[in-house]
Amino acid sequence: MLTDVVDLLLCPQCRARDVESGLDVGDTDRTLVCDRGHSFDVARQGYVSLLTGDGGKFTGDSAEMITAREVFLERGHFDPIAAAVSAAVPAGGDAVLDVGVGTGHYLAAVLDARPGARGIGVDVSKFAARRAARSHPRLGSVIADIWSGLPVRAGSLSAVTCVFAPRNAGEIGRVLAADGVLVVVTPTSRHQRELRGPLGLIGVEEDKTRRLGESLSGLFEPVAQSPLEYTMVLSHTDIESLIGMGPSARHGDPEARSGALAQLPDSVEVTASVTVSTYRTTGQRRRASASL
């Protein structure tokens, strides 16, 4: 719930003016307020919007995409990925943020393995925030745009996770504690390869993991890279959900894709292939954070 993480949050209005003003629960648990008088309503579903300006650089997932993701993930097909993310987060972590939290599936797995930890799920989609808010009792769900700045206190987090989502390295480095870690999951070029040609799905760049390292260079240093590859057996319904939850849902001809799917066997063996990468902030940034 938001009350579990409110001490970690910043007022986005003050933060936009380079003032770190913390948030607290208002007279009721339906508002969050800062000491400068800014107030933010908590939706009845349990999330809060801390967006500023025009609402964000990216368009968030639609209600249909979040529903498709929920259906697919509840079938357990990506559970090995969730387990790998949880294993990569240090056991002693107290506060974990998931960037692009989606349904809350991965952050909930991290929190389940750590009874004393609490989590912040950030997403630009209100439909994701709504679903994430009920994914775990120790998860606070926040609508925010990472490119406009995370509404989170500097150096307050023991870990940040990012699964198939964009990341703002500078902001992640700011909110991580001196000994905090960043865990990123990226797909390899083999991910879902059996479906790409027949169904015209969007491909994955060959060097995605290398490009991730380059984008973090100077702010983060690598700790570990763990490949994870396994075979999923998917029904046509599973495949429809898999397509519907990702970027391919916004591209191509749905009718043509449905016709192509009908030509596939009732059960299809599909490769799940990702790299789980762990990073720490560079020594210079750790020393700077420790001195704050």
Image: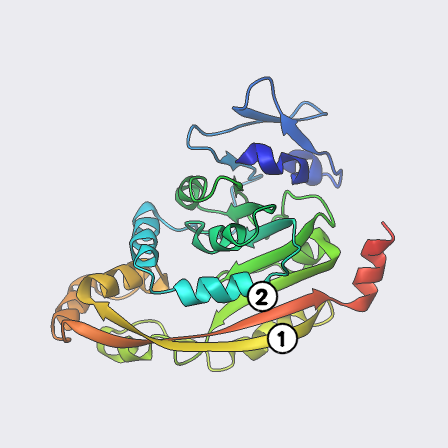
Residue 256 seen in this snapshot: yes
The answer to whether 271 is drawn above or below residue 33 in the figure is below
Position of 9 with respect to 83 (left or right) is: right
- Secondary element at image label 1: strand
**52 or 113: which is nearer to us?**
113
Question: Label 1: how many residues lie within 10 Å, few (<14), some (14-19) or many (20+)?
Answer: few
Relative height, residue 172 to residue 218 (above, below): above
Q: Which residue is the extreme one toward the right?
A: 291
The reply to whether discs 1 and 2 touch (Cβ–Cβ < 8 Å) is yes
Mark sitting on residue 244: none
Q: At 64% across and 56% down in the image, what residue appears?
A: 159
Q: CA distance from mark 1 to mark 2?
A: 9 Å
In the rendered structure, the answer to whether residue 215 lies left or right of residue 281 reads left
**Which is nearer the eye, 29 or 255?**
29
Which residue is under mark 1?
224
In the rendered view, would you say 34 is above or below 185?
above
Image x and y of residue 216, in percent:
66, 69
- The image shows residue 252 at horizontal and vertical percentages of 26, 66
Q: Nearer the viewer, residue 233 or 279?
A: 233
Residue at the image point whose x is 60% and y is 51% from the top: 96
Q: Residue at x 29, y 49 (%)?
A: 64
Of the residues under marks 1 and 2, which one precedes in the sequence?
2
- Residue 133, x across and y down, in percent: 45, 40
Residue 166 in sight here: no
| Amino acid on which the number 2 mark rests in the picture | Ala
Query: Identity of the amino acid at label 1?
Result: Ala
Give the quarter of the image for residue 189.
Answer: bottom left
> Circle 2 is placed at which residue position?
88
